[in-house]
Image (spheres, rainbow, N blue to C red):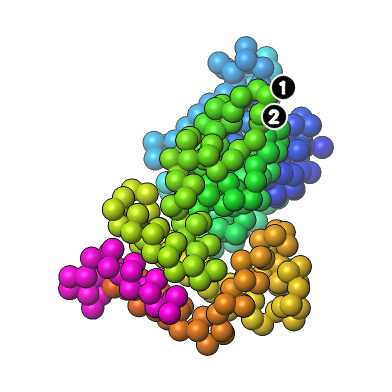
Amino acid sequence: MAAEQKTTTYEGIMSDLKAGRYAPVYYLMGDEAYYIDKISDYIADHALQPEERDFNQTVMFGSDVTAAQVADAARRYPMMAERQVVIVKEAQNLKQTDQLEKYFKQPLATTVLVMCHKNGTIDGRKREYVKAIRAAGVLFESKKLRDRDLPSFIEKYLHEREVSIDPKSTQLIADSIGADLNRLTGELEKVIISLPADDRRVTPQVVEDQIGVSKDFNAFELRDAIVNRNVFKANQIIKYFDENPKAGSIYSFLPMLFNYFQNLMIAFYAPKRQSQEGVAEWLELKSPWAAKDYMTGMRNFSGMKVMQIISKIREIDAKSKGLDNPNTPPGELMKELIFYILH
């Protein structure tokens, strides 16, 4: 029965929906809007036949209605349809949710109520409210993807659309777009559309042409140059960034470098640090290939040097935000950091 659906992963929820199994309540919350939108949009597009929507699909906004009004709408019966759908956008703006809590304790089986709560989660003190939601249907938290999970997301997204991509192109896209999945998938769709029918491969050149990320001067290449202690190439890229601020800046590559050296420090403690597979498992990387840069880093930097670099990155980050830095421009801070890392 639909009321028994308790799946709380995105893949599980979508699998149930595609099988026609609808729960009476979906409370979708979290900092990542992408999965909330995907689930609510699917319900809006598939729970009812097109001719049933005029009388049986209601969209409300939490800033415009009260919890009591949402509960009243959910208690209505469908007109000439199996079910009705009530979607509440901006549910985080609803106040005094007592009436909704009462509804969750006795939800109508013929209603699919979808609550879209973005940019946060339910107040942890509302334990009874959360308990009532869980009993009624599905409580799903949409979390931001970690940077290290972006490559696998990109590869899976493209694979499902019968498009292949090489590891370098994957990392280029992940580094340049970041973890905003709505923006990321929008850029991926743009790339997919550009591919010819007889060559469904994403290459660094395609990334440069369609997303505007230079295949030679970017955060990925900068990290590669640093990992391999290629002083000339690293300084070339820093000079390019200094002259082309839109291509890259200290604000975009500092988090990337901090993440790399933080993981490199952890890699030194891996029980099987001589093995690429062992390091990948220790760092919870998706594939042994992803551990290659850490194997190289452990050869080129000592553990003590990595600790000093992490401290230096923190110092430069503070200076880039104006702390103890009256007038040093970002370009000079970039050069100072790269010199420190490589010498």
Q: For residue 115, which quarter of the picture? A: top right
Disc 1 to disc 2, C-alpha distance? 7 Å
The quadrant in which the C terminus is found is bottom left
Q: Is residue 122 visible?
A: no
Determine which of the numbered discs, if any, sits on residue 110 in the image.
Answer: 2
Q: Residue furthest front?
A: 232
Please tell me which residue lies in front, 108 or 64: 64
Q: Element under label 2?
A: loop
Q: Whole-percent x and y of residue 285?
A: 68, 63
Please tell me which residue lies in front, 83 or 263: 263
User: Of the residues shown, which amino acid type is indicated by label 1?
Assistant: Glu
Q: Element under label 1?
A: loop
The crowding category of the residue bearing disc 1, from other C-alpha atoms within 10 Å (few below 14, some 14 to 19, many at least 20), is: some
Horizontal side of 302 relative to 106 (left or right) equals left
Q: Whole-percent x and y of residue 34?
A: 55, 42
Residue found 64% across the figure and 50% down from its top: 167
Task: Find disc 1 in the rendering and name its residue.
Answer: 82
Q: Is residue 7 visible?
A: yes
Question: In terms of sequence position, does the residue under pointer 1 or pointer 2 come before the other?
Answer: 1
User: Of the residues shown, which amino acid type is indicated by label 2?
Assistant: Thr
* 300 up-or-down from 203: above or below: below
Residue found 34% across the figure and 67% down from its top: 334
Q: Whole-percent x and y of residue 133?
A: 64, 49
The quadrant in which the N terminus is found is top right
The answer to whether marks 1 and 2 mark residues whose Cβ atoms lie closer than 8 Å is yes
**Does the magenta-highlighted stretch encompass residue 76?**
no
Q: Identify the magenta region.
A: 320-343
Q: Whole-percent x and y of residue 258?
A: 48, 70
* 62 up-or-down from 55: above or below: below
**Does the magenta-highlighted stretch encompass residue 330?**
yes
Q: Residue furthest top?
A: 51
